[in-house]
Amino acid sequence: MKNSYFDIAIGVVGLAASVFGIGYAFGQRKKLNDISEKINKSVDELSANIDVDIKAAVVERAVTKAIERETNLAASRATTNVMNAIESDISSQVRKAVNDTYQDIRKSVVEETAKKVEKIDISALKKEVVEKAKEAAADKFDDSLDSVLEEFKDSLGNVSRIYQSIANVFPSSTAGNKGITFSLGS
């Protein structure tokens, strides 16, 4: 039980300290408000009694600087807007000119091509194509004939060696026979 009386006593002391702290805070706040009011009244009275004299030259300089700054800013904006408008206009004009020129060039190219095609002599063109084809075929045929001729010569050489080997097997002097001789005419 002693602990509970002790706990109650500490709670009462804490409560009293809290109430005292709150009262103290309110009292200090009132003092600060009073001091703040006195300072505000003093500043108002001082500012009402002080006459600030700003020379016209200082005001004029400030106004001149402000005017220059605003003028430069306005001129810069206007220049940028004009440049953008000019670029847009030039781009539009160039695009239109290119499109117009393209149509004119396309039309003249089509007309000129049609005229050139009309002037082509089909029979002469056929003859030229046939001649070129004949030349190409003849060149290919000559190449083929050359390779066939080489193969024939190689085969003929082989046949000649075979006959020569056969002739060497037979005796060269037989009764009444002069011998067999093979020769290839070239």
Image (tube, helix red, strand yellow):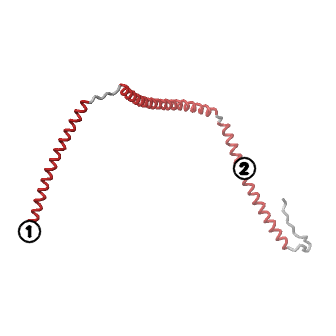
In terms of sequence position, does the residue under pointer 1 or pointer 2 come before the other?
A: 1
Q: Position of residue 184 (x, y in %)?
A: 84, 62
Q: Which mark is residue 2?
A: 1
Mark in the foreground, 1 or 2: 1
Identity of the amino acid at label 1?
Answer: Lys
Q: Which mark is residue 150?
A: none
Determine which residue is flagged by label 2: 139
For the N terminus, the quadrant is bottom left
Q: How packed is label 1: few (under 14 Cα within 10 Å), some, or many (20 or more)?
A: few
Residue drawn where x is 13% and y is 56% of the image:
17
Q: Are marks 1 and 2 in contact (CB under 8 Å)?
A: no
Q: Identify which residue, 84 or 154, lies in the foreground.
A: 84
Residue drawn where x is 85% and y is 60% of the image:
185
Q: What's the distance in space between the residues labelled 1 and 2, CA to CA?
A: 133 Å
Q: Position of residue 112 (x, y in %)?
A: 60, 31
Q: Quadrant of residue 82?
A: top left
Residue drawn where x is 87% and y is 69% of the image:
180
Q: Position of residue 155 (x, y in %)?
A: 77, 63
Element type where label 2 sits in the image? helix
- Left or right: residue 48 versus residue 170 is left
Residue drawn where x is 83% and y is 68% of the image:
164
The furthest residue to the right = 176
Identity of the amino acid at label 2?
Answer: Asp
For residue 137, above or below residue 149: above
Q: Quadrant of residue 161?
A: bottom right
Element type where label 1 sits in the image? helix
- Left or right: residue 51 versus residue 87 is left
Q: Identify which residue, 75 or 27, lies in the foreground.
A: 27
